[in-house]
Amino acid sequence: MDRNTILRRLHAQVKVNGHIVGAAVGSGMTAKYAAMGGADFLLALSAGKYRVMGRSSYASYFCHGNSNHIVMELGTKELLPIIRDVPVLFGLFATDPGIHIYDYLKRIKENGFSGIVNFPTLSLIDGKFREALEEDGNTYAREVEAVRLARYLELFTVAFVTTKEEAESMLEAGADVVCVHLGLTKGGFLGAKHAISIQEAKRMTEHIFSVCEERNALRMIYAGPASTPVDMQYIYQNTSCQGYIGGSTFERIPAERAIYNTTKAFKSYGSFDENDPMVKIINGNWNAGDYTEFVKKYIEEHYMKEIQLGDLALVAHVSPSYLSVRFKKEMGISFTEYLVTYRVNKARELLANSSAPYKEIAQAVGYTDYVQFSKMFKKRTGLTPGEYHKIVFKT
């Protein structure tokens, strides 16, 4: 797809839909369904390939493999053969010493890619390591030059930037899209553990976009703390952003959730009523009010087994601390207190209706240690299991 056609489509999307979406992908399957879902363009990045291997996107910055070779193989073997109506961009590692930029750009175009994006980008590296790289000739300016040459070859260009100065350089080189890279995506199992706030992302975005106002370049952001539609709604409402590019948002996080929860579902049993909080969690179709119901339902069905709040938090894709606080706020008691009370009440029922050995009853309600069970039982009833059993049977 030629550059002018892409730009006409994107500007039309902004006018009609208000924004555009780019998806950084690491497999043909992700590309296929991202395109079906409405992605306006796809980015073939080495980070994407590492993501589907179960590694962090930052693996593309290490010597695990040649980034350009990885992207070329991903694009020509997995993406371009099945993607017809959506532009596919080549994630170009411009400081690769093994390529001649101009010749390699021609090869990229000849192989069917519609454009390029500067990734891996030096803009995500700082400190002494950045200084050492630049001293050796590995500079952001080489990424700018790659965009300039790509524009000369009529390739569509997306420029990742993290500062106003980088944005100005890319605009001067003729970049079609200026995308503020806000860091690795938060959320999920492999997501960034430390990310800037949405408010900080807003300030950073507007500061950089201020140099784009008199240019015709489209304005987008990449991930970071913005990993949900609600996050992006805030960005759209409070900045001049016109689009979102996501990688883990469209690939890693949905895959983590679907694979993990589907496997969990096959390991579980019971009702599959769509309104059941357990099923809502498995299907990813829940809201904040369902978390407590999910925990209560799980305890009801699995009180006889070991239950860890951390495991439930993983299934619900929230932190253990968040789930703990939310549960206590809604129930008035902690998760542990609720679980112990539930088990003791079940033990009382068994003691009142069974002559089974007390150790078996302890095991039936989730306690492998009878001493601990007896201690918890007495703390809540004032009686040992044996004393309680005798009183109940006498009455």
Image (spheres, rainbow, N blue to C red):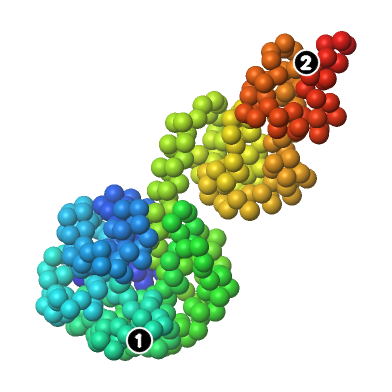
Taking 385 as reference, is 122 left or right? left
Is residue 311 among what the camera can see? yes
**Position above or below: 112 against 264:** below
Q: Label 1: which residue? A: 131
**Position above or below: 199 against 73:** below
Q: Position of residue 118 (x, y in %)?
A: 29, 75
Q: How many other residues sit within 10 Å of disc 2, few (<14), some (14-19) or many (≥20)?
A: some
Q: Quadrant of the N terminus?
A: bottom left
Taking 184 as reference, is 295 left or right? right
Q: Position of residue 93 (x, y in %)?
A: 24, 74
Whether tag 2 and tag 1 are in contact, CB under 8 A, the answer is no
Task: Residue at 86%, 16% (x, y): give it.
Answer: 391
Task: Residue at 72%, 12% (x, y): give it.
Answer: 354
Task: Residue at 75%, 33% (x, y): give it.
Answer: 376
Q: Position of residue 317 (x, y in %)?
A: 53, 49
Is residue 242 among what the camera can see? no
Q: Label 2: which residue? A: 352
Q: Position of residue 159 (x, y in %)?
A: 33, 77
**Position above or below: 140 against 62:** below
Secondary-structure class at tag 2: helix
Q: Which quarter of the picture shows residue 383?
A: top right
Secondary-structure class at tag 1: helix
- Residue in the foreground of this view, choosing between 250 and 13: 250
Q: Quadrant of the C terminus?
A: top right
Q: Which quarter of the picture shows residue 48?
A: bottom left
Amino acid on which the number 2 mark rests in the picture? Ala
Sequence-wise, which precedes: disc 2 or disc 1?
Answer: 1
Amino acid on which the number 1 mark rests in the picture? Glu
Q: How many other residues sit within 10 Å of disc 1, few (<14), some (14-19) or many (≥20)?
A: few
- Residue in the foreground of this view, choosing between 304 and 386: 386
